[in-house]
Image: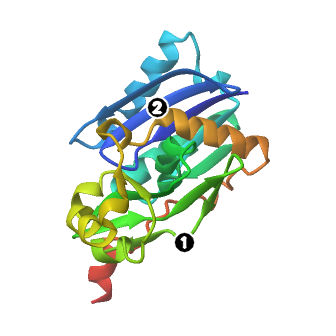
Amino acid sequence: MKLLAVDTATASCGVAVADGRTIVDRHAMVSRVTHSRHLLSIIDDLLRRNHLAVSDMDGFAVTRGPGSFTGLRIGISTVKGLAAATDAPVAGISSLEALAWHFHKSPLMVCPLIDARKGEVYTCRYRFENGGITALAPEAVLPPDQAVAGIDEPCLFAGTGVDICGPAITAVVGENARLAPPDRNAIDPAVVARLGMERLEQGLAENLDTFAPVYLRKPDAVIHQQK
């Protein structure tokens, strides 16, 4: 099975191509402009240099959130369009879970933190056991002190929200805190590809009619309308 994976959940825009369990190629870039400016060109360049076409893909994977509202809409709408054109299935992948999978060999609890702006972070807590992942809490958007509250064991923190939570991590977790190296704070599209491949092999494809981003909080436009 050949699969194209897309990640646009944060400032990083990533694309990867997998053939079975093998990552054929990947490309990721960080940009301050909207991902709509470069996502399609990244996909096209990646496929061309590997002598592939969208029609060669047997499936697609995309980060479903939480993350940037605009970024998620761009990534998901692009993948849904490609999937509709090729009649191929789509796997939606949690951006927090994808970030945590960088550390799937770690015995420590892993707490990914993604900048949600407004002084909050998207977060969850995971543990890896027997080759699988277990979420220890629901995905949530929280202020830093609540995001790290109650952590009293060695814990690995990663993501764009680590700097925001720095003071809270120091105050609450202290010497139990382990910070990921800077190159592990962005989602790797190759991880999205691997997780997507697993989901599709298990028959866990999304329903394209209902598949939508996971925001965890309402967009500002909705909040203003309700006031």
The answer to whether 159 is drawn above or below residue 136 in the figure is above
* Kind of element beneath mark 1: loop
Label 1 or label 2, whichever comes before in sequence order? 2
Query: Looking at the rendering, in which quadrant would you find the N terminus?
Result: top right
Kind of residue sitting beneath label 1: Ala
Query: Residue tagged by mark 1?
Result: 137
Name the residue tied to disc 2. Answer: 15
**Vertical position of residue 32 compared to residue 133: above or below:** above
Which quadrant of the rendered structure holds the C terminus? bottom left
As drawn, 205 above or below 169: above
Rendered location of residue 82, percent (x, y): 57, 36
| Left or right of 127 in this view: 145 | left
Residue type marked 2: Val
Q: Position of residue 175 (x, y in %)?
A: 32, 61
- Quadrant of residue 23 in the image? top right
Question: Does residue 29 lie above or below 62 as drawn?
Answer: above
Image check: 106 left or right of 210? left
Spot occupied by residue 185 in the image (x, y as percentages of width and height)? 35, 44
